[in-house]
Image (cartoon, coloured by chain):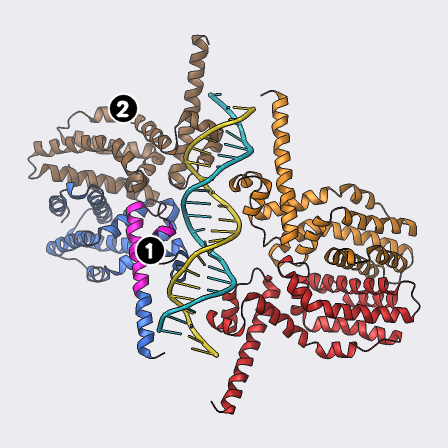
Chain colours: A red, B orange, C brown, D blue, E cyan, F yellow
Amino acid sequence: MSPRTEKQIEKLKQKKEKLILESALLLFSEKGYGNTSMQSIAIRSKVSKGNLYNYFEGKEDLLEGVLMYGLNQFAEYFNEFSTELFTEKEFEIAIRGNFEMIQSNKKFWKLYYNLFAQPEVQDLFTKIFTPFFEQYIAIFEMYYKNKGDNDPKATALLLGSALDGVSLGYLLMGDTYPLNNVINQLIEKFK
Amino acid sequence: MSPRTEKQIEKLKQKKEKLILESALLLFSEKGYGNTSMQSIAIRSKVSKGNLYNYFEGKEDLLEGVLMYGLNQFAEYFNEFSTELFTEKEFEIAIRGNFEMIQSNKKFWKLYYNLFAQPEVQDLFTKIFTPFFEQYIAIFEMYYKNKGDNDPKATALLLGSALDGVSLGYLLMGDTYPLNNVINQLIEKFK
Amino acid sequence: MSPRTEKQIEKLKQKKEKLILESALLLFSEKGYGNTSMQSIAIRSKVSKGNLYNYFEGKEDLLEGVLMYGLNQFAEYFNEFSTELFTEKEFEIAIRGNFEMIQSNKKFWKLYYNLFAQPEVQDLFTKIFTPFFEQYIAIFEMYYKNKGDNDPKATALLLGSALDGVSLGYLLMGDTYPLNNVINQLIEKFK
Amino acid sequence: MSPRTEKQIEKLKQKKEKLILESALLLFSEKGYGNTSMQSIAIRSKVSKGNLYNYFEGKEDLLEGVLMYGLNQFAEYFNEFSTELFTEKEFEIAIRGNFEMIQSNKKFWKLYYNLFAQPEVQDLFTKIFTPFFEQYIAIFEMYYKNKGDNDPKATALLLGSALDGVSLGYLLMGDTYPLNNVINQLIEKFK
DNA sequence: CATGAATGAGGTTTCATTCAT
DNA sequence: AATGAATGAAACCTCATTCAT
């Protein structure tokens, strides 16, 4: 019961929690949320089924955990990004950064696009990702406004949608998709 | 046994099959494929659970039926589209046509994007939609080649992905999404 | 409605009934009674599912039909057999005849042994086959009595059981089972 | 967590597994494999339907469990039997032992003969029982060889088949079947 | 006699979640 | 915190049988 022990327990808990989250991410992403059983997550995390519920209240809560955990990994990127963009160079860096982020954790983003249009978890999804999406759009809108675009909001939305589309295509088609070439064209057209 | 009676029966059967397909489309699109039970489709079609299986061999076969049924509705559009594009005007018409098609049957396209990244039914999905997708890309690629684009294939893929992204955004966000404005900007940038 | 037409109808009916019976025998024998659906019998007989019920009242009635139909094919044999046996030569002929009968319609006898120990249809089975079995035993009992056997009834039962066992083994193992050799030994021991 | 508790749990689990196996044996044997529902097994074992699947992977796996469980009860007999037979006295003991074994667990052997000719589960059946059957035959073959029989293999197969036939008759007819008398005659003829 | 759509009970199996230990 | 047995609802699907045509 000494503070030290408590810390250790906390650490262990975090370690186990992390393990669960990573197992869940892997399975959700590979087999889909609906087709992943709590059982299989338990097995992969080497945690008992019952104990899973000491860490997460239920399957949906676990999904939320997975999404938050995934997002945290990109916190740094998002922080940097949250500054304004003024030059085309900065724009290009932001776009390329976006795809590096996706490439660096395909599993997470595959899950993201897997959930994108899932009515089952739409509320949760919206709750978590809407802020990010709106932040993105706002920054791009400002960028196009500064450039004198005739409809900055629509252009920003178009860009955001194009980024989604390209990411989705890349994640689904894998290396058949000539990602770098497509990015180059995208930057050319949208900068 | 008269031809008339047979025809009537055939019609009735088609009518019921159509009813089932439409119920299934609605439910799949609203609740997702995995979260729609055969039971609920039966109830909505006013058909007994067992009788469903006289029309479709199983749930996945029913999904295939729904997708084919949906696609057939756009046969005309696809046929027109399959000609080559030469002028910017033709390009614009094609793009606007694409979105009219989507707006004319949102349920179907919502289901489309719902299945897009579903591992569960990926094989079926790929089987059905890959031909269309490739045809699209090929036509756009030719268009950009004619225009002297430096990487026509990448540009065509970018366009295809952008169309996906915009459609997805529109279908998910509903009327919050300023579709027409976005389309205008898209045509401006990609024509 | 002329007698001629009626006869033709009767013939057609018999033809179709025969067809159904033979399809049913084949399927029951190959897949088992419980695992054969009325549907599959209908398809194989090229008769509609509904029409099946114009010929037989239900599945069990159809089974009864199959069994009676099969037995009728052996009527001649049974009639001959129903005379008494006096000499060892007659005994041998009877035994060999028994196995020729089995070899001449393996499907039927496979079904027979398939149903032998099926609680599901035991009543029907008993109803149909008990008379034959008892007749068999009675004749053999008389045979052994004439020979001065110390317990003719038990010997007759032993013989009957041995015949069952050999038939069963042969039908299950197929040509791996050296039927003729086994019959020779059986005749040697039991004559 | 003490060893004692674990053992108790293990014991309880075994007890429940045993309970399920025995319920299943009873029902399979009384109503046939195909006509016994998992539901009914669950009810009889006082276990929930779902929990059944914590003990056995499915219905066929449960059947396999039942067969193995039944066979294990005769392990001792089989072990003794696996020695060679030299004298007629040993032969007689073996035969009588065989029937004692059958009488001591009629349910199991009824199931055995129930499955004997069931196409549905033939593979499983063959997998489990073929070794025993072949061992039997081999030992009898050696016995007859030693006795100078003119076709020891056929005689051994005949004996094996006769044993099957007698067992089957006894199990189906119950006490109407004068088992002991028949056995006496069998020993007389085959020793 | 003939058709096959229709029914609805019942079958096996899966699964998120709970709870006694 | 940890276990995994236990639950029970719900899923997909099959099938003998009926019945309007």
Is residue C118 among what the camera can see? no
Tell me if residue D28 is in the magenta stretch.
yes
Pick whichever, C171 or D156, lies toward us: C171
Q: Quadrant of residue B52?
A: top right
| Figure check: A79 above or below D136 | below
A39 sits left or right of A67 in the view: left
**Pointer 2 residue:** C76
Residues shaded magenta: D15-40
| Figure check: D169 above or below C63 | below
Tell me if residue A160 is in the magenta stretch.
no
Q: Give the structural element (helix, strand or loop) at label 2.
A: helix
Query: In the rendered structure, the residue with mark 1 lies on which chain?
Result: D
Please tell me which residue is depicted at 57% across the width and 69% down the height of the picture: A62
How much space separates mark 2 and mark 1, taking CA atoms?
A: 40 Å
Query: In the rendered structure, the residue with mark 2 lies on which chain?
Result: C
Is residue D153 among what the camera can see? yes
Image quarter of the N terminus of chain D: bottom left
Q: Pointer 1: residues within 10 angstroms few (<14), some, or many (20+)?
A: some
| Figure check: D118 above or below D23 | above
- Which amino acid type is shown beneath numbered disc 2? Glu
Q: Give the structural element (helix, strand or loop) at label 1.
A: helix
Dominant secondary structure, magenta = helix
Numbered label tally: 2
B16 sits left or right of D76 in the view: right
Please tell me which residue is depicted at 24% across the width and 40% down the height of the picture: C164
**Pointer 1 residue:** D128
From the top left corner, tell me how far across and down residue B115 is, in percent.
66, 55
From the top left corner, tell me how far across and down residue B137 is, in percent.
79, 54
- Which amino acid type is shown beneath numbered disc 1? Ile
From the top left corner, tell me how far across and down residue C21 is, in percent.
40, 29
- Tag nearer the camera, 2 or 1: 1
